[in-house]
């Protein structure tokens, strides 16, 4: 069987691989072996792709889908070493072409498929191996990771004024993030019940050093997956807004906030700036938040921030509605059932006080009725 483009040595490797693997596409060990192939194993990769093309109808599920995931896994950039990342940063600083610079940046932070051998995890966690795999999860552990965490300083972003470059980079990063979110949904990490992409990102923007906790640093400095692309996208859009506000607004308007929590958080972060998002849009956004989004500031910190920072720009009607919701308190159904009702009520009151104080700290003005309630609740909580 001819394999164009392979050297004599690679052709022999391909022939040997074909003979060995042609009847073993439903062998768990062969599947895990294929996971180890790197860019240095092009002959083996090409052979397995051909084998699958010829025999895919004979490969039963879940092995058929598992092989498709492995092929997609092979397409991720192989830049996992510190030396590779060093070379990438060197190229960024060396004045590469605009297209190449954007490609390097996006490839560095883009969310990619990560696959780990289920066998390794079984040995680590002492799990019992499924004798007859029924799902891909019985064979492989699928997740999303990324490469380098690039900061605005790494790109010297604050000194980039080229509007066209920033606009193209913002759209490229946006496309990379959307691709990653779609990938997460395909592997089951996004559903109506849970969205693991959301808790992977502490903040969708780079937190300024003056806001770091004592002894701490940027909250996502060790996070891969979605944090690198989301945070860099927001930073680029902020820089673009300085040069061309309308272009930045078009990027923001393209974010699918109705489908993805991360885009919703990015939008809220952008909406803190009254030059980017109109007050009427912020009003509608805040009023449409569900109870979790409204109250869970640890999961959706940007929602609480935009509520506080844009409070004074909201209409009186909207402020009254939001104050009423805050005074009503967090629904007790969110609290563990083991907590007695009296304690749960105190907890809900404390959460309401926290959010109202957040609004005050931002320089906003509460109604007289709400301010009176806040003063009384604060005193009662301090001296129960």
Image: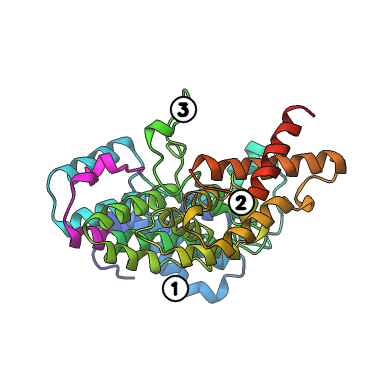
Q: Is mark 1 on a helix, strand or loop?
A: helix
Q: Are marks 2 and 1 in contact (CB under 8 Å)?
A: no
Confirm whether residue 142 shows in the render.
no
Q: Do the residues labelled 3 and 1 touch (CB within 8 Å)?
A: no
Colouring rule applied to residues: rainbow
Q: Which residue is drawn at 63% across and 40% down?
A: 354
In the rendered image, residue 81, in percent from the top left (x then y), is placed at 34, 38
Q: Is residue 259 above or below residue 214?
A: below
- Mark 2 → mark 1, Cα distance in angstroms: 68 Å
Q: Which residue is drawn at 21% across and 42% down?
A: 156
Query: Is 27 covered by the magenta stretch?
Result: no
Span colored in magenta: 148-169
In terms of secondary structure, what is the magenta stretch mainly?
helix
Confirm whether residue 53 shows in the render.
yes
- Mark 3 → mark 2, Cα distance in angstroms: 36 Å
Name the N-terminal-most of marks 3 and 1.
Answer: 1
- Mark 3 → mark 1, Cα distance in angstroms: 51 Å
Question: Which label number is shown at residue 53?
Answer: 1
Of 169 and 265, the residue lying toward us = 265
Q: Name the residue under label 2.
A: 367
In the rendered image, residue 210, in percent from the top left (x then y), is placed at 39, 31
Q: Mark 3 points at which residue?
A: 216
Q: Residue at x 56, y 74 (%)?
A: 58
Name the N-terminal-most of marks 2 and 1.
Answer: 1
- In this image, 53 relative to 304: left or right? left
Of labels 2 and 1, the one closer to you? 2
Q: How crowded is mark 2: few (under 14 residues within 10 Å), some or many (20 or more)?
A: few
Which residue ends up furthest to the bottom in the rendered image?
57
Of 249 and 83, the residue lying toward us = 249
């Amino acid at each position: 069987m001819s394999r164009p483009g392979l050297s004599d040595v690679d052709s022999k490797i391909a022939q040997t691989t074909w003979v060995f693997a042609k009847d073993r596409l439903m062998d768990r060990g062969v599947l895990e072996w294929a996971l180890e192939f790197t860019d240095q194993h092009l002959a083996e990769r090409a052979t397995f792709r051909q084998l699958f093309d010829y025999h895919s109808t004979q490969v039963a599920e879940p092995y058929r889908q598992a092989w498709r995931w492995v092929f997609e896994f092979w397409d991720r950039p192989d830049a996992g070493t510190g030396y590779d990342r060093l070379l990438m940063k060197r190229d960024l600083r060396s004045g590469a072409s605009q297209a190449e610079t954007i490609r390097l940046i996006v490839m560095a932070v883009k969310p990619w498929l990560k696959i780990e051998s289920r066998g390794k995890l079984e040995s680590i966690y002492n799990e019992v191996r499924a004798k007859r795999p029924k799902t891909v999860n019985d064979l492989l552990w699928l997740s999303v990771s990324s490469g380098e965490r690039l900061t605005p300083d790494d790109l010297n972003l604050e000194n980039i004024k080229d509007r066209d470059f920033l606009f193209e980079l913002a759209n490229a990063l946006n496309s990379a993030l959307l691709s990653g979110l779609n990938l997460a949904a395909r592997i089951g990490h996004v559903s109506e019940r849970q969205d693991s992409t959301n808790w992977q990102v502490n903040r969708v923007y780079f937190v300024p050093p003056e806001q770091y906790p004592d002894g701490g640093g940027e909250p996502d400095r060790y996070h891969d997956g979605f944090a690198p692309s989301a945070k860099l996208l927001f930073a680029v859009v902020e820089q673009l807004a300085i040069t061309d506000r309308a272009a930045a607004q078009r990027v923001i308007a393209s974010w699918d906030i109705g489908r993805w929590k991360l885009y919703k958080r990015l939008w809220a972060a952008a909406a803190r700036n009254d030059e980017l998002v109109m007050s009427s849009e912020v009003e509608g956004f805040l009023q449409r938040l569900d109870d979790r989004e409204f109250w869970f500031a640890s999961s959706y910190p940007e929602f609480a921030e935009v509520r506080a920072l844009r409070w004074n720009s909201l209409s009186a009607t909207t402020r009254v509605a939001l104050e009423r919701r805050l005074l009503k308190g967090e629904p007790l159904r969110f609290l563990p059932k083991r907590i007695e009702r009296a304690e749960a009520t105190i907890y809900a009151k404390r959460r309401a006080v926290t959010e109202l104080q957040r609004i005050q700290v931002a320089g906003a003005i509460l109604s007289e009725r709400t301010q009176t309630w806040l003063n009384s609740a604060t005193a009662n909580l301090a001296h129960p």
